[in-house]
Image: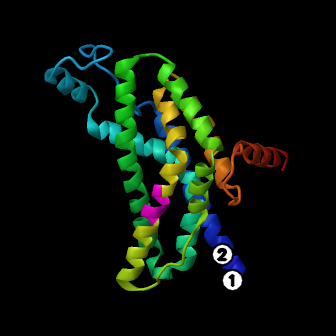
Amino acid sequence: MRDAYRDRELDWARNLALCLSVLAWMALAAGQFRMAPTLCPCVGAGTIQSWSSMRMLLSANPPISLAAGWLLMLAAMMAPALIAPVWHIRVQSLARRRVRSTALFVAGYAAVWVAAGCVLMGIEIVAQLLAPAGLYAAGVVAITALIWQCSPLKQVCLNRCHAHRALCAFGAAADRDALKFGLEHGYWCVGSCWALMLFPMLLPQGHLAAMAIVGVFMWGERIERPRSPAWRVRGIGRALRAIGAWGTS
């Protein structure tokens, strides 16, 4: 009976995460939300000419539109990676608190990624100013992401993403633990994925295709088991094997 219960909760978490991811991909593909800041003609390469130019730059990139695009990008790429922690939240929470605990976890996780998004978009604006419509910045980030992807520090972050600690079941302590779990998971997730998330943002075109490829890498590394920190290639082998098994099933 216990196994059936845990399997049912896992199915619930998986279905919710995949549905959210698919809906976010559809919204991004529709092109109604801006995933990246764009320069206005008044801003030339290498510098921002005046405060009025900065204001025009901000008016061309409304914060609400950028925030919506970033949250959709986050949901599209990261929702599948939240299946395990959301399942952990649900099986450790009382039935009457599951929705509340899940919402607090997601709020904490999203808050960390929103803060990271501000930094990443700032980097993107600087890169566009220095080399508009070029591949130089994307190439530098691609090399950085590849090195980080293989580094021992990347494995440390991944191992912490797999660490799901016990949670309190009652009262304010349960709310605190759910929120803290979301903040901690978001912190280590940013540490693991920051370079992979930045790469599609710096491409002059092909954002969605690059996001899909990066998403496969991130999904593949999340279904791997924790390992000792070392230099190694991560994610893609397990992802390709899983895709192959799914395709032949």
Please provide percent x and percent y for residue 41: 27, 13
Name the foreground residue: 12 vs 208.
Answer: 208
Q: Name the residue under label 2.
A: 6
Figure check: 71 above or below 94: above
Task: Tell me whether the residue at label 2 lies in contact with that at label 1, contact meaning CB atoms closer than 8 angstroms.
Answer: yes
Q: Is the magenta stretch mostly helix, strand or loop?
A: helix
- Residue 94 is marked as none
Which amino acid type is marked by label 1? Arg
Question: For mark 2, does the 10 Å Cα neighbourhood hold few (<14), some (14 to 19), or many (20 or more) residues?
Answer: some
177 left or right, relative to 8: left
Alpha carbon distance from label 2 to label 1: 6 Å
16 left or right, relative to 201: right
Q: Does residue 200 show up? A: yes
Quadrant of residue 6 in the image? bottom right
Question: Outermost residue toward the right?
Answer: 248
Please provide percent x and percent y for residue 231: 69, 46
- Residue 2 is marked as 1
SS of the residue under disc 2: helix
Name the foreground residue: 189 vs 8.
Answer: 189
Where does the magenta region start and end? 182-187
